[in-house]
């Protein structure tokens, strides 16, 4: 395994703050811009959403999800060659344990202090995505695929 690619993937996941979550139900895709956090090994992504939202209902019906994490905000308009985009493939894992829900709320609040009050909303449900693979694009043509076991 190219250790450098694994390091780049983990750094990108840890350093960025937002992702695009793609869900689907009945062959209809749905995308949502989301604040997120990850665990130390970068094999889980944490989000918060209303249980009445389309994305949550979609994940309950079809747990396969994709996320996009990228560096476009970090780059100048003319510097597309340095942009990195990471496609994350995974599956929704409904959280039952209240202690785990609280741990995820705290982790999201730590990473996003400006959203701390929002995360306390009792109508919001913590979401855990179990990561299966990463596809890292460096610029427009260099692609690196890694399963979670290769990371």
Image (tube, rainbow, N blue to C red):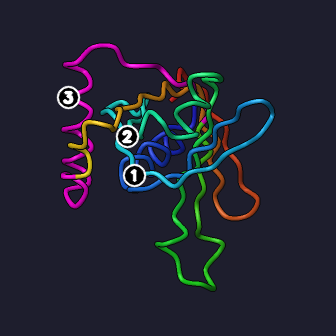
Residue 140, image quadrant: bottom right
Q: Is residue 59 above or below residue 49?
A: above
For the residue labelled by badge 3, is the local secondary structure a helix, a strand or a loop?
helix
**Nearer the observer, 85 or 6:** 85
Marks 2 and 3 close (CB-CB < 8 Å): no
Task: Report which residue position mark 3 lands on.
Answer: 102
Residue 85, image quadrant: bottom right
Mark 1 crowdedness (10 Å alpha carbons): few <14, some 14-19, many ≥20: some
Mark nearer the N terminus (1 vs 3): 1
Label for residue 115?
none
**Nearer the observer, 47 or 13:** 47
For the residue labelled by badge 1, is the local secondary structure a helix, a strand or a loop?
strand
Residue found at the very far top of the displayed protein: 97
Task: Report which residue position mark 2 lands on.
Answer: 48
Task: Report which residue position mark 1 lands on.
Answer: 35
Q: Residue at x 43, y 42 (%)?
A: 10
Alpha carbon separation for disc pair 2 and 1 = 8 Å
Marks 1 and 3 close (CB-CB < 8 Å): no
138 sits to left or right of 124: right
Q: Is residue 81 above or below residue 116?
A: below
Q: Point out residue 29 in the picture as x, y percentages from the top left corner.
A: 73, 42
**Nearer the observer, 7 or 132:** 132
As for residue 40 lying within the magenta part, the answer is: no
Q: Point out residue 38 in the picture as x, y percentages from the top left corner.
A: 36, 38
Mark nearer the N terminus (2 vs 1): 1
**Nearer the observer, 59 or 46:** 59
- The prevailing secondary structure element of the residues shown in magenta is helix
Marks 2 and 1 close (CB-CB < 8 Å): yes
Q: Point out residue 83 in the picture as x, y percentages from the top left corner.
A: 59, 67
């Amino acid at each position: 395994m190219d250790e450098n690619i694994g390091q780049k993937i983990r750094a990108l996941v840890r350093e960025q703050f937002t992702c695009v979550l793609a869900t689907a139900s009945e062959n209809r895709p749905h995308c949502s811009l989301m604040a997120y956090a990850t665990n130390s090994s970068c094999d889980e992504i944490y989000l918060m959403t209303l249980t009445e939202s389309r994305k949550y209902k979609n994940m309950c019906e079809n747990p396969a999800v994709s996320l996009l994490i990228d560096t476009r905000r970090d780059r100048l308009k003319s510097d597309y060659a340095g942009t990195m985009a990471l496609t994350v493939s995974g599956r929704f894992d409904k959280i039952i344990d209240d202690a785990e829900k609280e741990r995820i709320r705290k982790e999201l609040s730590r990473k996003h202090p400006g959203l701390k009050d929002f995360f306390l909303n009792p109508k919001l449900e913590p979401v855990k995505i179990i990561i299966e693979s990463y596809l890292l694009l460096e610029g427009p043509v260099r692609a690196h695929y890694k399963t979670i076991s290769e990371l």
